Image: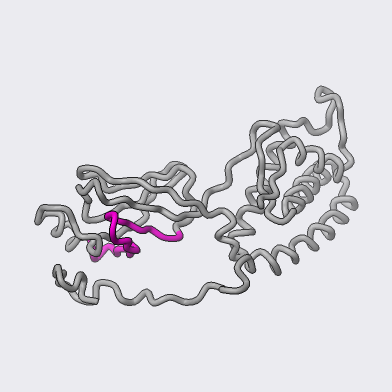
């Protein structure tokens, strides 16, 4: 069950920690606008910490769609990291492997032969866009509208803007972001001793995250998978796919 907290609640927690409560924004040492920037920066750091601590699934989502005509790109605006790409024709479901640059020629040749590619022929590669989000290239381009792709990925952090916007602290770990934000405010105020105290208290939460964040599925931890059986030959056939 999500442990979501609102931006308004985060503001209150941070001001309490930093002892900077205010009822008058005009005379506040730190306005809510500046406070929101520090909170968002800290929440973004926490988002990354949880992912690094192997908590991928905390921020994992899935989206499905089709490719039409010669369009071979998916654009996902909140994309951060890919977990898996699958495709189905309604009866079969196939994990789509990644292609390397040396495979482009043979994949383009398959597209030139005409007709819709078989599920086992499809390959993907991530491409940069220069803007937030990500592109997933699929080759050969699929003209088959029956092919439905599902992208399993980790989302980027979505900044909190309105007081009612929420952040999922998973297990109360939003306190790490509150301490981080409060420390920033105290450093600005040059209250270094108080900032040092909060730094020590934040370290306790750090140890909890390191110890627990990656143990969400303690009964069945991730294992190493076989990733070598891809393109073992240069010839694709209808009977054997890429030869494996």
Compared to 166, does 80 lie above or below? below
Bounds of the magenta segment: 83-104
Count of numbered tags:
0
Q: Looking at the image, which residue sits at the far front?
A: 91
Does residue 57 appear to the left or right of 198 in the view shown?
left
Identify the image quadrant of the C terminus. bottom left
Q: Residue at x 41, y 44 (%)?
A: 130
Query: What colouring does the structure picture have?
Result: one colour
Q: Residue at x 70, y 32 (%)?
A: 163
Q: Position of residue 168 (x, y in %)?
A: 66, 48
Q: Nearer the viewer, residue 134 or 117?
A: 117
Q: Residue at x 80, y 33 (%)?
A: 30
Q: Residue at x 65, y 52 (%)?
A: 45
Magenta stretch containing residue 130, yes or no? no
Name which quarter of the figure residue 185 lies in. Answer: top right
Name which quarter of the figure residue 217 lies in. Answer: bottom right
Q: Looking at the image, which residue sits at the far left?
A: 113
Q: Position of residue 96 (x, y in %)?
A: 32, 62
Q: Position of residue 240 (x, y in %)?
A: 18, 73
Does residue 205 appear to the left or right of 149 in the view shown?
right
Does residue 176 appear to the left or right of 67 in the view shown?
right
């Amino acid at each position: 069950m999500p442990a979501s907290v609102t931006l308004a609640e985060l503001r209150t927690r941070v001001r309490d920690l930093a002892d900077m409560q205010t009822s008058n924004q005009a005379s506040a040492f730190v306005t809510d606008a500046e406070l929101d920037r520090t909170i968002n920066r800290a929440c973004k750091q926490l988002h990354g910490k949880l992912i690094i601590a192997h908590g991928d699934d905390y921020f994992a989502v899935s989206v499905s769609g089709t490719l039409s005509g010669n369009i071979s790109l998916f654009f996902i605006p909140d994309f951060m990291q890919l977990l898996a790409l699958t495709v189905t024709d309604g009866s079969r479901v196939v994990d789509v492997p990644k292609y390397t640059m040396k495979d482009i020629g043979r994949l383009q040749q398959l597209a030139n032969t005409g007709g819709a590619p078989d599920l086992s022929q499809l390959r993907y590669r991530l491409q940069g866009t220069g803007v937030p989000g990500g592109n997933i290239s699929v080759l050969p381009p699929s003209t088959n509208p029956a092919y439905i792709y599902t992208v399993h990925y980790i989302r980027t952090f979505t900044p909190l803007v309105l007081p009612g916007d929420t952040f999922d602290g998973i297990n109360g770990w939003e306190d790490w972001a509150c301490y981080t934000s409060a420390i920033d405010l105290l450093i600005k105020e040059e209250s270094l001793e108080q900032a040092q105290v909060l730094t020590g208290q934040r370290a306790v939460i750090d140890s909890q995250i390191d110890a627990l964040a990656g143990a969400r599925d303690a009964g069945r931890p991730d294992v190493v998978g076989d990733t070598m059986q891809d393109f073992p030959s240069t010839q694709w056939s209808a009977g054997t796919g890429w030869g494996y």
